[in-house]
């Protein structure tokens, strides 16, 4: 009896121990699952937080590229780092990488962009609205090809060099020696001199004198090749939808394809002639071979003239597209909020200066007057007495250095006209209500006027972005007065309007006023020149930036450039981006980026 009881007891004990073991295993597995779940949750949290930082970096990078600014520098406190992949060839999309960082986790995302269509941005180094009469010389110096667009007729009796492409919405007439790669006009093109690679005319084309085309002439209208240059051939290839007239003396012609008729009075030979309509070759003729769809008249006794007839000949030449331009909008009043010193007059005619974001000065309205002791001019203070002296015991700060301490930088100014002359002025963006005449001196300022701007004497000025850290934040003449929105923690932070050295003209009651910029002899400006109406150059001027003159006020006369004008785009400082134009309320013109579809990519965590 005892043995069976003992056996049953052992079995019971074994069963209990088994159940306890199974329960322990279940609890252990559950705890492990909880630990794994917790770990996975932590990893997911790190991943998503790093991803959020990466996407924030992508947004900040896109904003910087859109504004034409450098990418924000790597900053561990921002939890992301940015990188722009170099393009392998021209036209490749812009690829931006952003890596988010959180608690040892890294997540990299990327997106590809192309410049967005539309907008007012103009990539041309020279953008002119209205007719241009260039009697002097324009020399453009740059490390890469740059273009020039004229929304009007172009007359070149002088010379222009360094331009890759010249576009016109009207006619192009050239009498001076040129070396331009591409001409493209919505009207007629007349060339009496110069060497060109490609010429495209929506209207007619005429070559005279020593003009030659080394690659292609494409014409929607008629063409007259009347030049006799030393180049061989004088025209490498021509595609003309209208009739063609050739009288080139002994000059050779390359290939001619036309949907019209051809009349040859004299030439030194032609490599190929294909014409849909009639061909008439006068005299003995020169070597030529080709196919004609219409009637032919030539000296059949000349064995070097081999012309076949094909009434079914159809060339279907590609037409020349029209030059499309969008006129930028320049308005000084858009930039009042960007000014560090805004000059105006009160109801009594006294000068007021509105100060914004200048280190060492509180924002607000100031007077421009004499020092409290009355001995020195060009002082800013809250108020002046009847003699124009700043009140004693109140802060007063000089903002301009005259030719002497007693010299008034604004002597000769009157309501509606500001005359500025001296040696230098406190750096920053200056805004003037009315016309502005700037004389001698060296300035680290962006000048904006609601009227016209003219320079004279030995004038030299640097746009705020061009002057950069040394000229603006560490200016030796005004070490304590610097614009706080450009100078932060010992670094220079460019803003788009800081690319302009001269900007003139504005809308009042829907009508444009002013906008003419006249550059005096020997003027040197470092930055973009934006004329809301017209630009005039007296010669021997140098511009280190892009030029726009957009004819918003009319005028009925062409932009006349005489003497010599040099546009130098070499060795520009990193803080200066001349291709950021005018036109938006934030003080510049974004170039615009469009993300490519499906270009967003999460490359995972590290």
Image: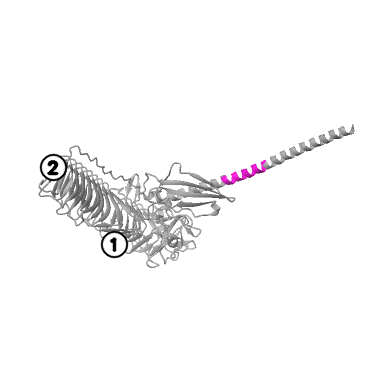
Depth order, front residue of 38/301: 301
Mark 2 element type: strand
Horizontal side, residue 564 vs residue 377: left or right: left
Q: Nearer the viewer, residue 228 or 516?
A: 228
Instruction: Give how far apart the Cα atoms at labels 2 and 1 are.
Output: 56 Å
Q: Main secondary structure of the magenta part?
A: helix
Q: Position of residue 499 (x, y in %)?
A: 39, 55
Instruction: Quarter of the image for the N terminus: give it.
Output: top right
Whole-percent x, y for residue 347 in the image = 39, 52
Q: How far from the left and from the top, in percent, is residue 4? A: 86, 32
Which colour scheme appears in the figure?
Answer: one colour
Residue 556 visible here? no
Would residue 376 be found to the left or right of residue 14 on screen?
left
User: What residue sits right under mark 1 in the picture?
Assistant: 540
Q: Is residue 605 visible?
A: yes
The answer to which quarter of the image holds residue 570 is bottom left
Confirm whether the magenta stretch covers residue 42: yes
Count up the numbered dots: 2
Where disc 1 sits, the SS reads: loop
Residue 378's place in the image compared with 62, above or below, is below
Look at the image and give the residue range highlighted in magenta. Answer: 33-47
Give the camera-side residue of 577 and 95.
95
Residue at image x 19%, y 37%?
312
Q: Pointer 2: what residue? A: 296
Q: Give the quarter of the image for residue 259.
A: top left
Q: Mark 1: few, some, or many residues within 10 Å (few <14, many ≥20)?
A: some
Which residue is rendered at x = 57% and y = 46% of the image? 47
How far from the left and from the top, in percent, is residue 16? 79, 36
């Amino acid at each position: 009896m005892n043995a069976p009881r003992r056996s049953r007891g052992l079995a019971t004990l074994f069963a209990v121990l088994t159940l306890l073991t199974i329960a322990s295993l279940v609890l252990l597995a559950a705890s492990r699952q909880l630990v794994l779940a917790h770990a996975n949750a932590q990893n997911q949290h790190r991943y998503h937080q790093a991803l959020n930082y990466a996407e924030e970096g992508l947004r900040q990078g896109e904003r910087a590229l859109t504004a034409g600014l450098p990418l924000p520098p790597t900053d561990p406190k921002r939890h992301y780092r940015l990188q722009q992949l170099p393009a392998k060839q021209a036209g490749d999309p812009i690829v931006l990488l952003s890596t988010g960082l959180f608690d040892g986790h890294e997540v990299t995302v990327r997106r590809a962009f192309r410049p967005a269509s539309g907008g007012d941005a103009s990539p041309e180094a020279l953008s002119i609205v209205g007719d241009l009469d260039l009697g002097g010389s324009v020399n453009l110096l740059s490390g890469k090809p740059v273009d020039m667009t004229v929304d009007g007729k172009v007359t070149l009796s002088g010379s222009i060099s360094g331009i890759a492409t010249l576009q016109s919405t009207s006619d192009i007439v050239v009498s001076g020696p040129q070396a331009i790669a591409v001409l493209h006009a919505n009207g007629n093109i007349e060339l009496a001199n110069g060497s060109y690679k490609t010429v495209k005319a929506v209207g007619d084309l005429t070559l005279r004198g020593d003009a030659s085309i080394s690659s292609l002439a494409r014409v929607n209208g008629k063409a007259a090749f009347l030049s006799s240059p030393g180049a061989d051939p004088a025209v490498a290839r021509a595609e003309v939808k209208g009739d063609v007239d050739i009288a080139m003396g002994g000059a050779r012609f390359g290939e001619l394809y036309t949907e019209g008729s051809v009349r040859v009075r004299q030439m030194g030979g032609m490599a190929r002639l294909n014409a849909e309509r009639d061909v008439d070759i006068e005299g003995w003729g020169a070597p030529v071979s080709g196919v004609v769809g219409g009637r032919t008249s030539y000296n059949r006794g000349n064995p070097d003239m081999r012309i076949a007839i094909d009434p079914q000949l159809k060339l279907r030449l590609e037409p020349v597209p029209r030059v499309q331009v969008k006129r930028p909008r320049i308005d000084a009043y858009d930039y009042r909020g960007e000014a560090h010193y805004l000059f105006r007059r009160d109801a009594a005619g006294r000068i007021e200066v509105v100060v914004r974001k200048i280190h060492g000065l509180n924002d607000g309205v100031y007077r421009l007057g004499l020092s409290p002791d009355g001995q020195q001019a060009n002082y800013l203070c809250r108020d002046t007495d009847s003699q124009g002296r700043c009140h004693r015991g109140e802060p007063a700060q000089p903002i301009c250095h005259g030719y002497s301490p007693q010299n008034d930088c604004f002597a000769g100014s009157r309501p509606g006209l500001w005359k500025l002359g001296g040696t230098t002025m406190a750096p920053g963006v200056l805004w003037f209500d009315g016309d502005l005449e700037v004389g001698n001196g060296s300035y680290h300022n962006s000048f904006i006027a609601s009227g016209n701007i003219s320079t004279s004497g030995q004038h030299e000025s640097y746009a705020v972005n061009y002057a950069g850290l040394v000229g603006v934040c560490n200016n030796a003449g005004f070490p304590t007065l610097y614009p706080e929105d450009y100078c932060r923690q010992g670094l220079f932070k460019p803003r788009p309007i800081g690319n302009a050295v001269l900007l003139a003209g504005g809308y009042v009651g829907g009508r444009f006023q002013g906008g003419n910029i006249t550059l005096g002899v020997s003027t040197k400006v470092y930055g973009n020149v934006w004329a809301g109406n017209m630009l005039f150059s007296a010669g021997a001027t140098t511009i280190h930036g892009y030029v726009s003159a957009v004819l918003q006020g009319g005028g009925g006369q062409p932009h006349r450039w005489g003497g010599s004008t040099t546009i130098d785009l070499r060795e520009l400082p990193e803080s200066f981006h001349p291709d950021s134009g005018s036109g938006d309320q934030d003080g510049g013109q974004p170039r615009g980026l469009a993300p490519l579809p499906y270009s967003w990519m999460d490359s995972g965590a590290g």
